[in-house]
Structures are given as structure tokens and as C-alpha cells.
């Protein structure tokens, strides 16, 4: 899959997560299992896509934390029951808006 297509899909997934969690507090988030499942699934998909970026493209765009995004995917997939929802919420609230901005610049 070409890098531009991957970036487009990553932005789409972030927008889905934003739409699912919009207007929520952490307390509402953790009590809504459908939203949690949807967000965690899309975060894992985001990580999967980050792992498909070409090495040269990754090296030329160090402002994107490619390895950390893929690492989160591994944590979710291999330990779904032990996913730290506080960490997931912090990623949604803090990291995804910046990541989306950086991806849109690409």
C-alpha cells in the first residue's frame, strides 16, 4: 500500500475516534463499552497502518512517532484485557489531535 493512502486511512481512523469520543469525559468513556471497544479497535488499526509505512518515508518524517503508534497496537492486540483505559483516554485527548495535524501536513 502506498504511503499517501496509508496516511489518508490513518487520518480517517483518527476522525472516527474523535467522533466516537466527542464531548465525553473520561468517566463517561470508561463506562461506555461500545465507545471503548470502537476507540481501542481503531487505535489498533492505526498502529497496524503505521507498521506499513516504508522505512525511507518513516526516516524522512521523524516528527511522527511511527514506532510508538505500532507499539500501542501490539499492546492492544496482545493484551486486550489489560489495556490501560486511562492511557487510551490520554492518547485520544492529547496525542491524536497533534498526530492528526502532523499527518495532514504530509
Image: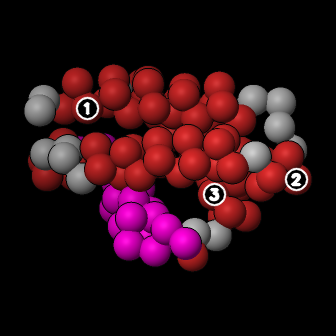
Secondary element at image label 3: helix
Q: Is residue 101 above or below residue 42?
A: above
Task: State the image quarter where residue 25 is shown.
Answer: top right
Badge 1: how crowded within 10 Å, few (<14), some, or many (20+)? some
Q: Is residue 13 left or right of residue 1?
A: right
Q: What's the magenta region?
A: 60-81
Q: Does the magenta segment cover residue 78?
A: yes
Q: Position of residue 53 (x, y in %)?
A: 20, 44
Badge 3: how crowded within 10 Å, few (<14), some, or many (20+)? some
Q: Are the residues flagged by discs 1 and 3 in contact, CB closer than 8 Å? A: no
Query: Rounded to the nearest whole Å, what is the CA distance between mark 1 and mark 3?
Result: 22 Å
Residue beneath disc 2: 27
Q: What sort of colour scheme is used for the picture?
A: secondary structure
Query: Rounded to the nearest whole Å, what is the CA distance between mark 2 and mark 3?
Result: 13 Å
Residue 6, label in figure: 1
Q: Is residue 22 above or below residue 51?
A: above
Q: Which comes before the other along the chain, label 1 or label 3?
A: 1
Of circles 2 and 3, which is in front? 2
Point 77% across, 55% down: residue: 30
Residue beneath disc 3: 88
Secondary element at image label 1: helix
Q: Quadrant of the N terminus?
A: top left
Q: Is residue 33 left or right of residue 13?
A: right
Amino acid at each position: 500500500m502506498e504511503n499517501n493512502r496509508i496516511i489518508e486511512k490513518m487520518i480517517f481512523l483518527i476522525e472516527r475516534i474523535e467522533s466516537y469520543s466527542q464531548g465525553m469525559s473520561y468517566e463517561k468513556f470508561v463506562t461506555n463499552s461500545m465507545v471503548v471497544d470502537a476507540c481501542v479497535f481503531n487505535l489498533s488499526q492505526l498502529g497496524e497502518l503505521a507498521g506499513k509505512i516504508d522505512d525511507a518515508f518513516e526516516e524522512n518524517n521523524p516528527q511522527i512517532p511511527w514506532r510508538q503508534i505500532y507499539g500501542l497496537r501490539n499492546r492492544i492486540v496482545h493484551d486486550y484485557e489489560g489495556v490501560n483505559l486511562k492511557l487510551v483516554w490520554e492518547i485520544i485527548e492529547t496525542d491524536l489531535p497533534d498526530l492528526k495535524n502532523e499527518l495532514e501536513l504530509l
